[in-house]
Structure formats: structure tokens, C-alpha cells
Image (cartoon, helix red, strand yellow):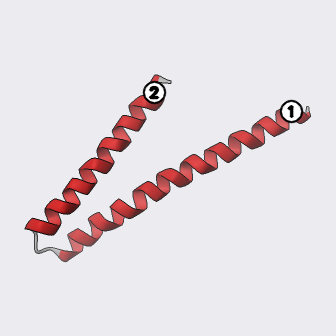
Amino acid sequence: MKMKKFFAIIILLLLIFSLISTVFVAIFSDNIRLLFVFLFIDIVMPVIIYAYLVITKQIRNLDKKEDDKE
């Protein structure tokens, strides 16, 4: 359980850092490509994390159903 909390804190810090970086680049930089990279990361990273959680939950449910049948 402690490992889950540790990874959750790290992911949360990465997301916060990414959002702060996006705002910083948007305000202080002229590099549009870098801004789009940060925006892409801000949108895609949470979607990938959510998809991972949904898929692992479904796999666990399938494993439980198979164990119940036996």
C-alpha cells in the first residue's frame, strides 16, 4: 500500500510540474513548438494514466471471475 501512495505522489508532482511548466512557457517563451509539446503532455499523460487504471481494474475483475468459476 505504501508503494501505491509513493507512486501516486510522484505522478501528482509530475502533473503539477508539467502544468506549471506549460504556464511558464506560455508566458515567457516565444517557442510555439515547446508550448505545444507541454500542452500535448498535459492532455495525454492523464489520459494514459486513466486508461492504465481502467485496464488493470478490468484485468483484475476477469481474474476474479475465473477464480470463482474454478
As drawn, is 55 to the left or to the right of 44?
A: right
Residue 14: % across, % down: 31, 46
Residue 1: % across, % down: 50, 24
**Please, what secondary structure does the residue beneath circle 2 have?**
helix
Q: Which residue was labeled with disc 2?
A: 3
What amino acid is found at the position of numbered circle 2 in the picture? Met
As drawn, is 18 to the left or to the right of 5?
A: left
Location of the C terminus (image quadrant): top right
**Please, what secondary structure does the residue beneath circle 1 have?**
helix
What amino acid is found at the position of numbered circle 1 in the picture? Asp
Residue drawn at point x = 55 percent, y = 54 percent: 51
Res. 24 image quadrant: bottom left
Q: Which residue was labeled with disc 1?
A: 68
What label sits on residue 55 in the rendered view?
none
> Residue furthest toward the right?
70
As drawn, is 53 to the left or to the right of 38?
A: right
Residue 42: % across, % down: 34, 60
Res. 9 image quadrant: top left
Count of all numbered marks drawn on residues in the image:
2
Depicted 33 relative to depicted 5: above or below: below
Residue drawn at point x = 60 percent, y = 50 percent: 54
Res. 62 image quadrant: top right
Confirm or deny contact between disc 1 and disc 2 (CB under 8 A).
no
Residue drawn at point x = 62 percent, y = 50 percent: 55
